[in-house]
Amino acid sequence: MSVIEARGLRKEFTVRVKRSRLRREKRVVRAVDGVDLTVERGEMLGYIGPNGAGKSTTLKMMTGVLMPSGGEVRVCGYTPVPQRTKLARRIGVVFGQRSQLWWDLPLRDSFDLLRHIFRVPADDHASRLRRCRSLLDLDEFLEIPVRQLSLGQRMRGELTAALLHGPEVLFLDEPTIGLDVVSKQAVRSFLTEVGERGDTTLVLTTHDLADIERLCKRLVVIDHGRVVHDGTIDALHARYGSRRRVVVDLDEPVASFGDATVEADGRRLVFEVDGSAAAVVARLGGLPGLRDIAILEPDIEDVVARLYKTATEDAP
Amino acid sequence: MADRPRPYLALLRGQVSAQASYRVSFAIDVGTNVIATVLDVLTVLVLFRVTKALGGFTLREAMVMVGLTALAFAAADLTVGNIERVKLYVNTGRLDAVLVRPLGVLPQLVLMDIPIRKAARSVFGATVLGVALASVDIDWTVARVALLVYAVLGGVLFFASIFVATASVAFWWIESGEFGNAFTYGGREFTTYPINIYSGWFRRVFAYGLGFGFVAYYPALALLGRTDPLGLPGWVGYAAPGVSVIVAAAAAAVWRVGVRHYRSTGS
């Protein structure tokens, strides 16, 4: 049986738009507009899209926070909103901005309170906490009140809090947003470890393509509330021709160099590469007056924008 | 400590230790609440200094209504009064975190914010009621003793329901501001006095339409063995606390619809 099953899932919001000083117009905004999605046990799914695409709204409908306007959704066999409390025991949720921790209490106390709230047997709780402590290096700040933790430390606390009841599905909304490089790495390797065990399904939204590359085999792109791509990340790049770019700045202009595009009167070379940029960089040694080399990752927002454009053009 | 998980107790424990981490601010809160309670006492004393009777009731008889209202309101305020903070949770989207826990939304919000500092007011209410009952001549029967107990419980349930119902407005109207206070604090003022001192549509709407007349006035009539100057039969006093159950059911329905109507906020 699939862990998550969504059919024609929709969410509409009514917003009031100010037209003039007195007149206000009601407008219906479709945040999620017919999403079909099936996720199997143990999958790691990246859910991406530009701001306002409907990522968070979809996650909130799957976790029982928001009531769908239409369509169907089942998670772990439950209908999220009517069976919210039953579902809550089976899933873990990390909404970056909505802490599950007690602001004024030491991190350790929050974990203890959550054990009671989720009715977790003491042994299970202790062994899960032990694992998180070693994987996420929690020991150095376990006794510090949450309000005094850095964002990276707090996020590590949130991840632990979401996993202590042994959820079947872990939903993460922007788990790496605002984190520094070291914390991002810590979060990613931890999630990789969780995912590799195979018993926890992971669904995460992100803006950071590197999260997806490290963590997710499957990528779902949503824009304007619709799924515009569902497949691997390589399939996405292959389909839309988005590639990494190597930008080389030169002191002396050149007429041409290999397959590079020449820009700025010959002072800039741009290479497009699939995968590793090492081969291109190795060839650059012979160039006279080499000033700078930059490797640009394909911008997910661009990819998605292009994707959506094609999606609307394809529509009848 | 015992190993059996106690979810709601854990919430309460978390809240108590969180409050204890701000000792000075907690002490100031307790202090201001004791002062406010003293002012409550003075208000009542001053009022009954200047009048000898109110709506045909002697000072002492009227004090039974004052005491019933004060105790019921203070106990409801202590337990669920903080539910008005739901608008904060809705406004900031923090309700998301509450909704992903395997517990009811209402008990979670209540237990995450119990204002222990308000306990002094319940003690005051109980004292006023006790003194008032001792100072009037009541023909104590088993039925009257039972009535006293469930009139207090009914009153607590009634005010608690009003708190919940008015707080639910935040689900539709985020900037609900002071709207709820008209019914909570306004309602308390209404039930403090004999309802025959109000007149016309105002009495009909508040006393009978919204049920505030059944919190203190009718139970007090039955306790005192007085007939209703407004003409309702004597058994109404004994049945009055039942109105709270209807009001509670209505409040629960409004709350449930409200939670489903919750829209959250951007990511």
Image (cartoon, coloured by chain):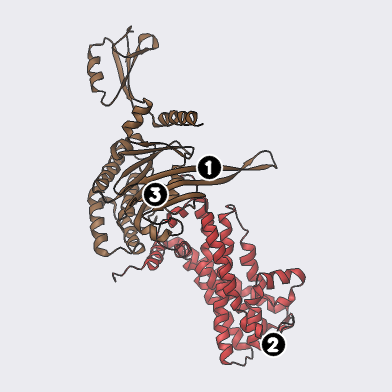
Chain colours: A brown, B red
- Amino acid found under the numbered disc labelled 3: Glu
Tell me the residue at 59%/74% (across/down): B244
Instruction: Confirm whether residue A39 shows in the render.
Output: yes
Residue A163 vs B213, above or below: the answer is: above
Mark 1, other Cα within 10 Å: few <14 / some 14–19 / many ≥20? some
- Which element carries disc 2, helix, strand or loop? loop
Which disc is residue A30 wearing?
1
Q: Earlier in the sequence, mark 3 or mark 1?
A: 3
Q: CA distance from mark 1 to mark 2?
A: 61 Å
Tell me if A97 is positioned left or right of B58 in this view: left
- Amino acid found under the numbered disc labelled 2: Arg
In the orientation shown, which residue stands out farthest toward the right?
A: B200
- Give x and y (percent) for residue B63: 64, 81
User: Do discs 3 and 1 belong to a common subunit?
Assistant: yes
Residue where numbered disc 3 is placed: A5
User: Do discs 2 and 3 belong to a common subunit?
Assistant: no
Q: Quadrant of residue A173?
A: top left
Mark 2, other Cα within 10 Å: few <14 / some 14–19 / many ≥20? some
- Give x and y (percent) for residue A139: 25, 52
Residue A46 vs A158, above or below: the answer is: above
Q: CA distance from mark 2 to mark 3?
A: 65 Å
Tell me the residue at 57%/62% (across/down): B254
Which disc is residue A59 wearing?
none
- Amino acid found under the numbered disc labelled 1: Arg
Q: Nearer the viewer, residue A77 or A273?
A: A77
For the residues carrying marks 2 and 3, which lies nearer the camera in this image? 3
User: Do discs 1 and 2 belong to a common subunit?
Assistant: no
Which image quarter is the N terminus of chain B in? Answer: bottom left
Residue where numbered disc 2 is placed: B226
